[in-house]
Image (tube, grey):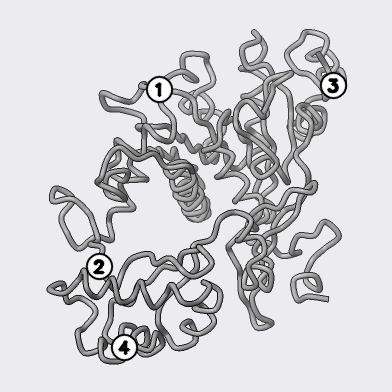
């Protein structure tokens, strides 16, 4: 039995999760909010999504990975009784996450200013493409929109056009949102009041450029050289080399059987083409996995370029259980590991995504609605249960 299993309860989650007892109401309709709340859920928060009755979450990009480990209540916020239901339900929550266009919720009567007047301890997190103000605030967009606007797209590869095959801005913004939420909860313990958090996905992506030693106006880039590039191996797979210090460069050259190149130094550019050709010839003599096994322990700073299936079967991933299986689908595990004197522990909530409306009665009941009130709202069409049309 693993250490994680010995510390886990019957649900598969660690008993003493950092956010245990924190209640999150997720009003988001798209992945940015779901990325955020699934992370909070893995850290112990109880998350309940508010879904539109009959919603098709797959069309909104909420699959098994982002829908797992949470509850679902079906509330029609456009129904005349919807705003009042939400105002009362908000009293159940510590945190509310939403990604509506700025001003839309307030125009409908249940925005931050209206809700916080009744529930001042509520931490409200708005995740939008461009933030709550500014000339682009109400512009629509998707991940590619924000990644391009942020400067990140061109910073990754200035040779346009190129198109990322995975979202970038959305999970970055969601992680920053989760960080801000935990900070606001900590602050609430001191002040007794919640906060309104404004997360711009575009600004979150721009924030990734912070680590550059060049000014943002100059552009952020790291040059490709013999010591920092991809090399094709005998089996057709690629390895990355990032041997940019004298120590790692020397380890690489010696491991490749080219010790005479070590004295060139990793950042020399005069003979770049020649150096690249010699390293390319060396890497072409063995499969990628052999090079990793040979050069990794020597400190040569290389890795294999993994595609999805390669990640699942990678020995390091398997040893650390970095991938979990939910409903037969292999998915990334929560990367956060909390430590104590017994070691490090990580928990990923592996509960299957709920059906829309599966927990409507549960949420309303916990928010103080009587059985008669719930029945009345159901009859009026303001709320629905799982399976309702």
Q: Nearer the viewer, mark 3 or mark 2?
A: 2
- Dot 3 or dot 2, earlier in sequence: 2
Residue found at x 68% / y 20%: 52
Q: Position of residue 306 (x, y in %)?
A: 54, 60
- Work out which quarter of the rendered image holds the N terminus and state it: bottom right
Tag 4 secondary structure: helix
The local crowd at label 2, few if under 14, some if 14 to 19, many if 20 or more residues have their Cα within 10 Å, is some
Q: Which residue is mark 2?
A: 225
- Nearer to me, 12 or 266: 266
Location of residue 362 with respect to 17 vertically, above or below: above
Q: Answer yes or no: do the residues labelled 3 and 1 have beta carbons within 8 Å?
A: no
Location of residue 286 with respect to 165 vertically, above or below: below
- Nearer to me, 206 or 341: 206
The local crowd at label 3, few if under 14, some if 14 to 19, many if 20 or more residues have their Cα within 10 Å, is few
Location of residue 141 with respect to 329 vertically, above or below: above
Residue found at x 83% / y 25%: 386
- Dot 2 or dot 4, earlier in sequence: 2
Q: Which residue is mark 4?
A: 250
| Residue 105 numbered mark, or none | none
Q: CA distance from mark 2 to mark 1?
A: 39 Å
- Dot 3 or dot 4, earlier in sequence: 4
């Amino acid at each position: 039995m693993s250490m994680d299993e010995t510390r886990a309860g019957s649900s598969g989650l660690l008993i003493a999760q950092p956010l245990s007892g924190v209640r999150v109401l997720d009003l988001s309709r798209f992945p940015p909010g779901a990325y955020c709340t699934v992370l909070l859920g893995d850290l112990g928060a109880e998350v309940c999504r508010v879904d539109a009755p009959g919603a098709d979450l797959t069309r909104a990009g909420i699959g098994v990975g982002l829908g797992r480990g949470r509850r679902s209540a079906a509330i029609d916020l456009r129904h005349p009784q919807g705003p009042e239901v939400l105002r009362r339900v908000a009293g159940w929550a510590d945190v509310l996450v939403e990604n509506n266009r700025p001003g839309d919720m307030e125009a409908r009567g249940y925005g931050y200013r209206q809700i916080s007047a009744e529930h001042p301890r509520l931490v409200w997190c708005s995740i939008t493409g461009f933030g709550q103000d500014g000339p682009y605030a109400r512009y629509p967009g998707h991940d590619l929109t924000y990644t391009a606007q942020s400067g990140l797209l061109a910073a990754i590869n200035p040779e346009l056009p190129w198109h990322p095959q995975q979202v970038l801005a959305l999970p970055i913004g969601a992680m920053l949102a989760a960080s801000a939420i935990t900070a606001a909860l900590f602050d609430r313990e001191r002040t007794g009041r919640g906060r309104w958090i404004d997360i711009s996905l575009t600004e979150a992506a721009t924030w990734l450029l912070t680590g550059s030693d060049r000014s943002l106006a100059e552009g952020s880039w790291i040059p490709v050289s013999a010591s920092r590039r991809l090399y094709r191996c005998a089996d057709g797979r690629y390895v990355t080399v990032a041997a940019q210090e004298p120590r790692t460069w020397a380890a690489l050259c010696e491991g490749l059987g080219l010790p005479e190149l070590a004295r060139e130094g990793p950042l020399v550019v005069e003979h770049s083409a020649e150096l690249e050709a010699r390293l390319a010839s060396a890497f072409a003599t063995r499969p990628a996995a052999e090079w990793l096994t040979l050069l990794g322990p020597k400190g040569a700073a290389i890795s294999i370029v993994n595609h999805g299936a390669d990640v699942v079967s990678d020995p390091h991933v398997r040893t650390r259980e970095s991938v979990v299986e939910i409903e037969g689908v292999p998915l990334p595990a929560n990367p956060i590991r909390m430590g104590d004197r017994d070691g490090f522990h990580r928990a990923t909530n592996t509960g299957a995504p709920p059906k829309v409306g599966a927990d409507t009665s549960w949420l309303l009941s916990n928010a103080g609605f009587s059985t008669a009130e719930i029945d009345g709202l159901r009859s009026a069409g303001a709320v629905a249960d799982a399976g309702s049309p």
